[in-house]
Image (cartoon, rainbow, N blue to C red):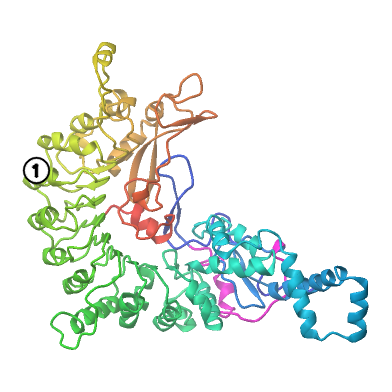
Amino acid sequence: MSPKPRFMRSPSPVGLGRSSFSSIRERDSDLAQTFTSTKISSYSSHNLKQLADEVAVSDEPSTPTSPLSAPSTAGDIVPSDNSMLLLPSQHGAVDFDLQARENDLAQSFARSLAWLNTPIESQVDASSVGLTDTVMEDVEDVKLTQSKQPLERLPFEIYRMIVDHLILDTPPNGIDRRNVDLMSLLVTSSSLYSMTLEALYRRVIVPHSRNFQKFFTQLEAHPDRGQWVRRLDFSHFSPVSLFATASARAAAKNLTSDTLLRCLNMTPNLQEFLVQDYLDGDIDESVIRKLLVGLPRMSALDLCGSSSVQFRNAFAAIAETEGPDSKDSTWPQKLGIQRLSLHKCISLPSTAFEFLLPKLNRLTHLDLAGTRVTNDALMSIPTTARISHLNLAKCSLLTAEGIIYFLTNHPAVNQDTLVFLSLGCDASTFQLLEVEDVTRLLPILPKTLKSLSLKGSKMDQSHMPSLREQAVHLEELALGRGLTLSDVGTLVQNAEASPEEEKAAKEPTPTPHELRYLDISDMEVENFNLTSLLIDGLLLSQKTWPLEVIEVSDPVFKRVSKSNNALHRMGWRQSEIGSRSWLVRGSPRSSVQSSRGRSSLPGSVCIRGTFAMENGQRKWKMGAQSWGMRKIPVAHAKVGGMYGSYMFGRKL
């Protein structure tokens, strides 16, 4: 029996996969607010002993293996050089001698076809005179071109449009097969291989350091391929996938600030760079400079959760040496970044925002939640910016007066471009908006808003008329403290007109609200009347349609769980992930379906006794499907990894 190839590994434990540590991922389902959570990597305990005996990166060729027998691919598919295709899989790497096999088959096929299609007298002449190898190769190339299938003869532009539909933006989780269709095209023929290869480099997801090292090695061997890279995504990165300690990870040197900078130097057309707090120690001053001014096509930058000392010092040093007071500054006055997320970069000094924001003249997405941004920094945003997504949650240095003035007077936000606005805060630690501030704020909000968070603010019944006006176009609304369940009921209840009133009405009565998501987690338990909720159906009846998700506090969630049967009879269910809890419309075999097998609610579907709501995906969510996201996405992608945790698993 032949020895076991070194790339083969024992299967992962049941229920574990190669997901990021503590990651949250949206589950593909017809029901809203469904997630999967991964608290530990498959490598962290089960395979640590085995991995300790392996080198960090192995470039040694292993036994050639057919791709049909390879394990299902889960990581990024990163092709290697022209003679070997590397398929990162769920249980390791499989080396497949693709190019050599293709060359042999193509040459054999071309020679046979050229010889069979040549007249007998020509064959004799060729044999007798002895054609040179160069002439024979030209004949073979012509015959090979003529023998191509229609798909292989398509112009590259048309073929690329086809390939774009085959790229599946599936986050790595150790279970789902990724880019299977592209892999099938890759091994079909040499012509399709060359045209498909570019698509596999376009969006690179790095779940662990070994995957990055393989990708980096291929870029060094083939620098031209770096021009294909448009996105580097580290949102699924797990630091404990291969090594138990930080010292072991540092000794391997798979992913460091030096290798990261060299990688960025080899990807000149990079447009989107997504990273999170697991890598903030490797983002030094040189990397930040490269991201901000060294990549001319950079349009989306996400540094979510980065708060290490190295990261803070690097940004502070740049702000000091390249700031407006510096005489030797060589930085441009305008940067091309359009979508910027510094979500929960809590250690950045205020000078960093005062230095960076004035240069973002094309800004459309800005997430500064939990940072030390100031009123002056907000006002320094260029007037040419057109912000559609703005997250200022838990910014303790901002004032209500400054925010209201900014939203009223700054051209970047008062041109009816705002779609997402979060001013939420934790009232137990910081109070941003008082009753008077909310009264002044609501009338100036644009009608283009789809998501508004006033969580943590102080509200009362006098705000309900303005909130009802906003609810006509809002799909997400997070309310503050001070309201009762009856107040909220007046916001979402759709009054039923009598037949005489409907007949007398010249025009159909408009829907009072468009709310799909309502956050009332600030409501105290004393104000939460379960009788009105579960028996009278104040928020759960069909009259509140299209309300789909209600976020509640943990105490309320526990009380409702004791009356789960009543909740199911109303056609609702419970859902939770991380530290957040929801009541969600749409439970299996709901009582709201009609006898004909159709749901009595518009926009919903009943299939085989299961009540399913409409898809929650919206263009302004940029790939997310669930409601109530805390973090603004800067790239169109499915939600997963640590970004899923920041977006849906945490309170604020």
Does the rendering let one see residue 87? no
Magenta-colored segment: predominant secondary structure: loop
Does the rendering let one see residue 152? yes
Q: Relative to 141, is 354 on the left or the right?
A: left
Q: Position of residue 110 (x, y in %)?
A: 79, 71
Q: Relative to 66, is 489 on the left or the right?
A: left
Q: Quadrant of residue 369?
A: bottom left
In the displayed structure, would residue 562 be above or below residue 317?
above
In the displayed structure, would residue 336 be above or below residue 435?
below
Front-lying residue, 283 or 187: 187
User: Few, some or many C-alpha atoms within 10 Å of disc 1 (few <14, some 14-19, many ≥20)?
Assistant: some
Q: Where is residue 522 in the image (x, y as percent from the top left)?
A: 21, 43
Front-lying residue, 366 or 260: 366
Q: Which residue is drawn at 49% across and 67% down?
A: 202
The C terminus, quarter of image? bottom left
Q: Mark 1 points at which residue?
A: 439
Front-lying residue, 197 or 572: 197
Q: Position of residue 429 (x, y in %)?
A: 16, 56
Q: Quadrant of residue 438?
A: top left
The N terminus, quarter of image? bottom right
Q: Relative to 70, is 409 on the left or the right?
A: left
In the displayed structure, would residue 629 be above or below residue 97?
above
| Residue 65 included in the magenta stretch of the image | yes
Amino acid type at mark 1 = Thr
Give, as a single range, the part of the protein colored magenta. 41-68
Q: In which quarter of the image is residue 358?
A: bottom left
Q: Residue at x 26, y 67 (%)?
A: 345
